[in-house]
Image (tube, rainbow, N blue to C red):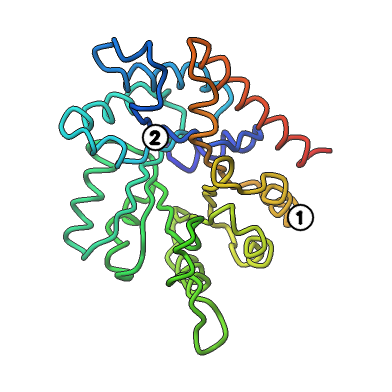
């Protein structure tokens, strides 16, 4: 099953939540700290309680790299535990000169066996090409991110009146020859999303920023509804992972993703 088929299979069922498996040892319930691998156990419980309701899982590599070899082993074991039909996004934000990117692509897709990856295109096409050569995978390229620093470069105005992030979207469309490209568009940029969504074409869209970062779920989903698109994923991490810090945290996380799905369904099909 290709990554595109996994994604399509979920979105056709109106599943749009990407569960961000970004575990913070200081935030996971205390009773798990007695486990041999508290983070892996936490991840497994989150996967078990959300897999029926999630569209994908997104793993931010930094939250595992922090713990060195043990952390990378936990990352690998977590990916192995995720059901085969579920899209796995490696949130690694790679992008380097061609031969280095080739090694990064092999790591993400061949070793960790992720279905998709996040990339930045600052160094141009040759830094992205090694990932795009994996035609059955999805490359999500950073367009407009949800952090305040996006104003530093992404929203710079060009001589022709367009913004840099719009140039990235246009270039990503050119690279999308095998329908394996997507963009990352921060959900905190609701106005920019509404103004630019018509230019996304067939690009898959990954939207961080809902929940703890303050993005408005209704405005984001409505933007896609108005252009009759459903190829989007909304990443939710902290507000779902740490909904509860007791032994009942799995139930709280499950209820949260069910609630999010119901809200999305209400907006799409009132």
Question: Disc 2 marks which residue?
Answer: 22
* Quarter of the view holding residue 65: top left
- Quarter containing the C terminus: top right
Check the image and report above or below for 211 versus 151.
above
Residue drawn where x is 33% and y is 26% of the image: 25
The residue located at (17%, 58%) in the rendering is 100
Horizontal side of residue 52 vs 226, given as left or right: left
Residue 216 can be seen in this image: yes
Classify the position of the N terminus by image quarter: top left
- Residue placed most toward the observer, 181 or 122: 122
Please give left or right for residue 7 compared with residue 72 in the image.
right
Pick out the residue farthest to the bottom. 159
Classed neighbour count for the residue bearing mark 2: other residues with Cα under 10 Å, few (<14), some (14–19), many (≥20)? many
Q: Label 1: state its secondary structure.
A: helix
The picture quadrant where one finds residue 254 is top right
Q: Nearer the viewer, residue 161 or 9?
A: 161
Which badge, 2 or 1, is on the more N-terminal residue?
2
Estimate the spatial distance between the alpha carbons at disc 2 and disc 1, rounded to whole Å.
Answer: 32 Å
> What residue is at 57 percent from the left and 36 percent from the top?
17
Tag 2 near tag 1, CB within 8 Å: no
Query: Measured from the top left, where is residue 38 in percent x and y?
Result: 31, 18
Q: Which mark is residue 226?
A: 1
């Amino acid at each position: 099953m290709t990554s595109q088929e996994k994604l399509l299979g979920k979105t056709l069922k109106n599943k749009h939540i990407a569960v961000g498996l970004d575990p913070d040892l200081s935030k996971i319930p205390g009773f798990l700290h007695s486990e041999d691998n508290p983070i892996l156990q936490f991840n497994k419980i989150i996967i078990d309680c959300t897999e029926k309701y999630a569209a994908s899982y997104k793993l931010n590599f930094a939250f595992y790299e922090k713990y060195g070899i043990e952390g990378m082993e936990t990352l690998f074991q977590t990916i192995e535990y995720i059901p085969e039909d579920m899209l796995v996004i490696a949130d690694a934000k790679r992008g380097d000169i061609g031969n280095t990117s080739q090694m990064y692509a092999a790591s993400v897709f061949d070793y960790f066996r992720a279905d998709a990856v996040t990339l930045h295109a600052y160094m141009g096409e040759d830094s992205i090409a090694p990932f795009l050569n994996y035609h059955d995978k999805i490359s999500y390229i950073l367009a407009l991110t949800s952090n305040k620093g996006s104003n530093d470069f992404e929203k710079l105005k060009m001589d022709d009146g367009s913004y840099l992030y719009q140039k990235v979207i246009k270039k990503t469309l050119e690279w999308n020859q095998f329908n394996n490209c997507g963009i990352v568009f921060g959900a905190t940029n609701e106005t920019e999303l509404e103004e630019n969504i018509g230019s996304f074409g067939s690009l898959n869209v990954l939207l961080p920023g809902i929940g703890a970062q303050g993005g408005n779920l209704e405005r984001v989903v409505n933007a896609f509804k108005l252009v009759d698109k459903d190829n989007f994923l909304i990443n939710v991490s902290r507000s779902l992972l740490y909904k509860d810090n007791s032994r009942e945290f799995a139930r709280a996380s499950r209820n949260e993703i069910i609630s999010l799905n119901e809200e999305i369904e209400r907006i799409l099909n009132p």
